[in-house]
Image (cartoon, helix red, strand yellow):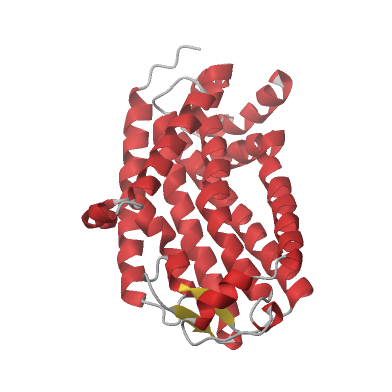
Amino acid sequence: MNGLFDSICVHLRPSAANGHRSASLGSVLRFEWVKLRGRRITWVPFLMTAIIVLLIVTVFHHLQFSYARKIFSSFQLVFQSKEQFVNGYYMSAHAMNPIFQILMPIFISVASGLMVAGEAEHGTLRACLVRPVSRGRLLLGKFIILAGYALALSLFAILLLLSTGVLNFGTGNLYSLNILFNNGQEGASTVPAADVPLRFMLAWLLATAGLMVLSALALLISSLVESAAMAYVITLSVYFSFLALRSFPFLEWLYPYLFVTHMLRWQQCISSYVKTDEIYVSLVHLAGYLIAFLTAAVLLFEQRDVKS
């Protein structure tokens, strides 16, 4: 592992013509990508996502959804059998809730924790910093690679859900209960089959934007602690604590100020009517959180005393 690290550190060395000028952002990105790609744990989330999707498909084959039919009937949507509403789109939408609320944040937090605290723990961060690259540029490179990783992982999840769902259950209108997707306490939503692919694309982009904000927060925490385990434990503690706050109705006034609220805005895409104004507000909030977290991470990383 040390031999591999020494060889990829060469990417950060400037050419003789450049003298002591700091390494370019492109060199930093290549450097970080090689490290990320070389970690076996990087590919574990893809395997775990595939296994979970296969389990979801199996469960959907065996469930009769009697309770769901009963709830739908109370909103004038009467289905005689599950085949009338359970299709590939229905499976994908409902599987997105646990995957993007629980699994993806865990995967991204672990990857982010390894970026700074993990390298400091193993002594490789100090070796990087003696190379001619500024700390701010190095951290920015780490974030860009993490953002790309989040984009690829979330796209893989969406495509796998849709492909396996459609292959096993076909297509059709997308039916959902509003309360399951934070689109109101009552009522059901119906999205025409022709509109569903575009809705999923928009949901993927919004969910990925939220994961990028979580990546920036994880980098901030990773810049403060000394071990990867501590970094992702703290990150996930913050994330799930804020998520839990959304379960208390008397704290509804606090919801707009929680970054997790805006991370979940992709759920609006499952509603009959997409509230574009709320999505726009969430994108503004996410951009603000991203800038704040990333700026704080760079400032703290600049002052960090790397001892090992």
Find residue 254 and report its horizontal and vertical position in percent: 24, 52
Give the image location of residue 141, x and y in percent.
Answer: 50, 41
In-image side of 77 versus 171 (left or right): left
Q: Nearer the viewer, residue 68 or 2?
A: 68
Residue at x 57% of width, y 31% of height: 12
Which corner quadrant of the image does residue 281 belong to?
A: bottom left
Q: Residue at x 78, y 72 (%)?
A: 168
Query: The N terminus appears in which quarter of the rendering?
Result: top right
Q: Quadrant of the rendered structure where residue 63 is?
A: bottom right
Residue reaching furthest left? 253
Residue at horizontal 51 percent and vertical 32 percent from the top: 113
Q: Nearer the viewer, residue 27 or 156?
A: 156
Determine if residue 301 is in view.
Answer: yes
In the image, residue 295 above or below residue 168: above
Image height of 192 relative to 157, above or below: below
Is residue 84 positioned above or below 207 on the image?
Answer: below
The x and y percentages for residue 223 are 41, 28
Quarter occupied by residue 34: top right
Residue 131 visible in this rendered orientation of the protein: no
Q: Position of residue 70 (x, y in %)?
A: 55, 76
Does 261 sit left or right of 161 as displayed?
A: left
